[in-house]
Image (cartoon, grey):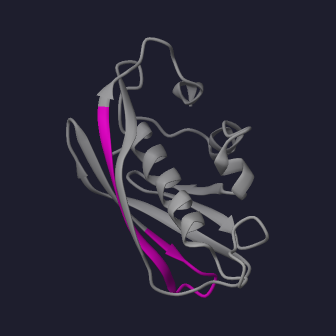
């Protein structure tokens, strides 16, 4: 089991007031023992001028999922999870509805985590695949807003 704690999804979603997650309409929808899912609308907030899902919005969804997954996998009293590197391959466009991302661990080490995030359209077809590397560092002195998940 990767996650040290399993917060209620409603609480997890509430903790995003004033963040990019809220502005893009990202909503956590499911949580397993070592994976997490969220969906994001393909609408005026997340499309580029041609009306297609913006690649940057897909990357924001991927980093949101992987970062929260790492946070749930560490002791937040002593450590923090910070993004180190992300890459993405955009393999198909999306024009409407929702896309859903799922983060699963590839590596959960003492100082780094690596997550694979697959984003799919409503038809289940792959839209984007991403890999996020997260650095596990000493927690800052002051607790963060997310530290109370």
Residue 130 appears in which quarter of the rendering?
A: bottom left
Residue, x 67% and y 40% (percent of image)?
Answer: 16
Q: Residue furthest right?
A: 44
86 to the left or right of 12? left
Relative image position of residue 17 (x, y in whole percent): 73, 38
Task: Report the number of discs.
Answer: 0
Question: Which quarter of the figure is the C terminus placed in?
Answer: top right
In the foreground, 30 or 53: 53
Q: What kind of secondary structure does the magenta stretch mostly adopt? A: strand
Q: Is residue 1 visible?
A: no
Residue 52 lies, with reference to residue 110, above or below; the image says below
In the foreground, 137 or 69: 137
Residue 78 appears in which quarter of the rendering?
A: top left
Residue segment shown in magenta = 118-136
Q: Can residue 144 be seen in this view?
A: yes
Relative image position of residue 119 (x, y in whole percent): 50, 72
Residue 97 lies, with reference to residue 80, above or below; the image says below
62 to the left or right of 52? left
Relative image position of residue 22 (x, y in whole percent): 72, 48
105 to the left or right of 53? left
Relative image position of residue 29 (x, y in whole percent): 62, 58
Residue, x 71% and y 73% (percent of image)?
Answer: 42
Residue, x 48% and y 64% (percent of image)?
Answer: 102
Q: Residue furthest top?
A: 141
């Amino acid at each position: 089991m990767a996650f040290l704690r399993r917060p209620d999804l409603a609480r997890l979603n509430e903790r995003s007031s004033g963040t990019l997650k809220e502005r893009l309409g990202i909503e956590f929808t499911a949580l397993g023992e070592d994976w997490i899912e969220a969906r994001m609308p393909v609408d005026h907030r997340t499309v580029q001028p041609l009306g297609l899902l913006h690649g940057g919005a897909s990357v924001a969804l991927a980093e949101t999922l992987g970062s929260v997954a790492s946070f749930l996998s560490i002791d937040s009293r002593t450590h923090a999870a910070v993004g180190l590197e992300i890459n993405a391959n955009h393999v198909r466009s999306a024009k409407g509805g929702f896309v859903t991302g799922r983060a699963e661990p590839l590596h959960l080490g003492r100082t780094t985590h690596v997550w694979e995030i697959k984003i799919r359209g409503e038809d289940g077809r792959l839209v984007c695949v991403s890999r996020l590397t997260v650095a596990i560092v000493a927690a800052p002195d002051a607790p963060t807003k997310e530290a109370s998940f």
